[in-house]
Amino acid sequence: MNPRHPYRILTDYYYNWRGLNNGLSFFHTHPQYEIYYFHSGNCDYMLGERIIRLQPGDLIIMNGMTPHGPKVYEPSEYVRTMFSFDPYLVQIFDENMRSCDPLKPFNVLRNYHFRLSPDAKAECEDILKRINRFYCQNDIVQYNRFLMAFYDLLMFILVQGRSVIEERQRTGSEREQYVGRLINFIDLHFMEDLKLDDLVKEVHISKFHLMKLFREATGKTITDYLYERRINQAKILFLYEKEPSVTHVCYEVGFKHLAHFSRLFKKQVGHTPETYKKLAHSAGGQLQHRK
């Protein structure tokens, strides 16, 4: 399950796991993105209003906030690999690796069920095996090998979903088009002094209409999304840079007031910025992410 080591970055992690009792339903939501792979067993998977009868080799990606979970039937076993992660983690990869948009399947398809071909099934299981091998090691070299395997999985998913993504982008709804453009703009400019009027000008629709479309698509206000994006960037800076002070990070990610930053950080993450920074660099420190 969740390996305990200093380089843990996945929120939840299970590899080739059999740890659910027969007959158990586990319908839930969370803000993280999720990758789920079904190895074997007898299970229906509930994804929003859909019920999917799983087959070995089925792969599901989720944006998290859609209710989802398995319904397991006796007497069959239930074996799956699953991990969830905060989407800001792709910032770990350099600009060239991000240029093909590793999270495009999650952002365009949002929740999608892939029924893999035999060759794709074998390739996916090989990648998952490598991820598990490297993720469980307390070593910076193996950690970087894990990151490459994780990136490879994102690229695998992108290839599997490419044709569907292209079709969705050609025929996307008004809501998806406007919200997607706004999210891309926020992700590029969140460190700046953004105001709602700036965002409205970017997508060329009325403020009221944009706010309504955004909440319908994400379940959040535009302001909440902007603050979450800034705090996620702050988490990256705390995790990978030891020197910057909390005050420096506060201003770096776009907040104007330290008290406001600290209050929102604790609400979203579950720790104050100071505590989070200490845990990030303590020996074997474990950062538990609030769901």
Image (spheres, grey):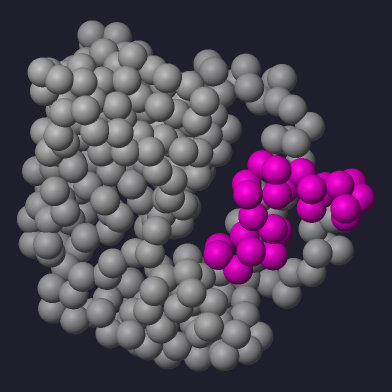
Q: Position of residue 177 (x, y in %)?
A: 73, 35
Quadrant position of residue 190: bottom right
Q: Position of residue 83 (x, y in %)?
A: 28, 43
Instruction: Locate the C terminus and report the quarter of the image it occupies.
Output: bottom left
Please name the predominant secondary structure of the magenta segment in the image: helix
Q: Residue at x 55, y 65 (%)?
A: 228
Residue 126 visible from this viewpoint: no
Residue in front for this viewpoint, 107 or 221: 221
Tell whether position 213 is magenta: yes
Q: Residue furthest right?
A: 206
Residue in front for this viewpoint, 97 or 44: 44
Q: Residue at x 18, y 42 (%)?
A: 14
Residue 170 visible from this viewpoint: yes
Tell whether position 245 is magenta: no
Q: Position of residue 10 (x, y in %)?
A: 28, 54
Q: Residue at x 71, y 25 (%)?
A: 172
Q: Which residues are magenta?
A: 203-229
Q: Residue furthest top?
A: 118
Relative side of 62 to 5, left or right: right
Q: Position of residue 281 (x, y in %)?
A: 23, 79
Q: Residue at x 23, y 8 (%)?
A: 118
